């Protein structure tokens, strides 16, 4: 039952990650391309395109964190695992636990930042996007990373059970 819930969440999160990253990067690339053509072809520049690209870079970085946890491509030092192979699973669980702690901090402090932006009604300079929408990515990313870390831990536990049953 728990595995089916995690599989469903995996499909939903993968769909969300892939399509939002695709669409945001595509929009940013088009805006940047148009801005370059206008700047060098017509000596005119769009101020909002640079702000859009900056916001897309921030967005893709935070959403990419969730995808990195899923793909197990977070930055880590694996020299100790190569020297002492018996430490692989304990260090993997420790790493996932640290990811979960970080995700919890992002949820809590991200929510605090969202509430601060909500109270102050700040907006971006050129496009006048309410900053509450931009800061909302922090707790969202924390929730997504937490779910991904739980999925990875579950997969590791299932793989260990299969290996134990085979021996």
Image (tube, grey):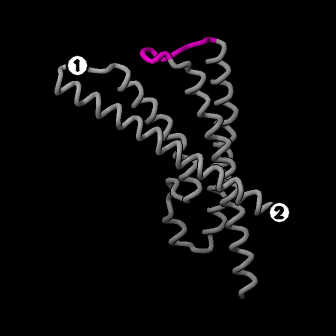
Magenta span includes 82: no
Location of residue 64 in the rendering, given as x and y in whole percent from the top left corner: 52, 46
Q: Is residue 165 above or below residue 127?
A: below
Q: Is residue 123 magenta?
A: yes
SS assignment at label 2: loop
Does 119 sit above or below residue 156? above
Separation of marks 1 and 2 at Cα, in angstroms = 58 Å
Return the disc, 1 or 2, that comes first in the chain's sequence: 2
Read off the residue under disc 2: 1
Task: Report the number of discs.
Answer: 2
Q: Tag 1's secondary structure?
A: loop
| Foreground of the two, 39 or 152 | 39
Report the residue at 69% width, 58% height from top: 151
Q: Residue at image x 72%, y 79%?
A: 162
Provide the residue designation for mark 1: 44
Other-residue count near label 2 (Cα within 10 Å), few / some / many at <14 / 14–19 / ≥20: few
- 136 on left or right of 32: right
Q: x and y percent of residue 154 in the render?
A: 72, 63
Q: Which residues are magenta?
A: 120-128
Q: Is residue 161 left or right of residue 80?
A: right
């Amino acid at each position: 039952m728990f595995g089916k819930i995690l599989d469903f969440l995996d499909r939903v999160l993968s769909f969300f990650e892939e399509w939002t990253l695709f669409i945001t990067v595509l929009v940013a690339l088009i805006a940047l391309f148009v801005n370059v053509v206008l700047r060098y072809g017509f000596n005119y520049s769009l101020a909002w395109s640079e702000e859009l690209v900056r916001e897309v870079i921030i967005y893709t970085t935070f959403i990419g964190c969730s995808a990195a946890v899923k793909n197990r491509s977070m930055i880590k030092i694996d020299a100790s695992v190569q020297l002492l192979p018996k430490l692989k699973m304990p260090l993997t669980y420790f790493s996932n636990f640290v990811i979960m702690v970080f995700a919890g901090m992002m949820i809590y402090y991200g929510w605090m930042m969202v509430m601060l932006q909500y109270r102050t009604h700040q907006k971006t300079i050129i496009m006048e996007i309410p900053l509450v929408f931009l800061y909302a990515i922090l707790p969202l990313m924390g929730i997504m990373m937490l779910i991904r870390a739980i999925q990875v831990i579950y997969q590791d536990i299932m793989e260990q059970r299969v290996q134990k049953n085979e021996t």
